[in-house]
Image: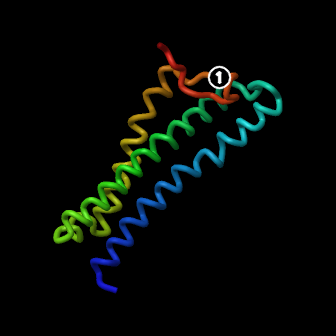
Amino acid sequence: MTAKLFMFFFAGNLFVVSLSVADLVVAVYPYPVILIAIFQNGWTLGNIHCQISGFLMGLSVIGSVFNITAIAINRYCYICHSLRYDKLFNQKSTWCYLGLTWILTIIAIVPNFFVGSLQYDPRIFSCTFAQTV
């Protein structure tokens, strides 16, 4: 296997693994907490669990979108800029792009955590961003 082919599989797979982590975040904490709310027919776990659950759900959604975007950019560069791909996506830069993806995800979600926009919604038995129209 050539080094160029290896780097494609490494970079591409690293972004897919990151997407998987983003999707699994909700399975670890928010979904079990939502099940408790469903079985108890309401939120009984307190505000801090509501905030954490809503934050992690938002983190998962935004992280998934940003990771899918990173995968699309990676594939685009491999197809359209194949001569420069190995320089654009070497091992070090791939990790940097991945870190940037998660930093942007956190930057996008953190302001909502502090402005108090996470509230319990009884229609969906979970804490989510309050929608003001």
Which quarter of the rendered picture does the N terminus lie within?
bottom left
Image point (69%, 22%), residue name: 122
Name above or below for residue 63 compared with residue 75. above
- The residue lying furthest to the left in this view is 83
Task: Please identify the quarter of the rendering in which residue 118 is found.
Answer: top right
Name above or below for residue 63 compared with residue 125. below
**Residue 55 in the image: x percent, y percent?**
55, 34
Pointer 1 residue: 121
Task: Please identify the quarter of the rendering in which residue 87 is found.
Answer: bottom left
Image point (36%, 49%), residue name: 69
**Residue 113 in the image: x percent, y percent?**
50, 28
- The residue lying furthest to the bottom in this view is 1
Name above or below for residue 6 compared with residue 66. below
Q: Is residue 128 left or right of residue 13?
A: right
**Residue 120 in the image: x percent, y percent?**
65, 23
Secondary structure beneath label 1:
strand
Depth check, front residue: 131 or 80: 80
Q: Is residue 51 left or right of residue 41?
A: left
- The residue lying furthest to the right in this view is 40
Depth check, front residue: 123 or 51: 123
Image point (38%, 45%), residue name: 103
Name above or below for residue 15 compared with residue 6. above
Instruction: Identify the amino acid type marked 1.
Output: Asp
Depth check, front residue: 52 or 34: 34
**Residue 43 in the image: x percent, y percent?**
74, 25
Colour mode? rainbow
- The residue lying furthest to the top in this view is 133
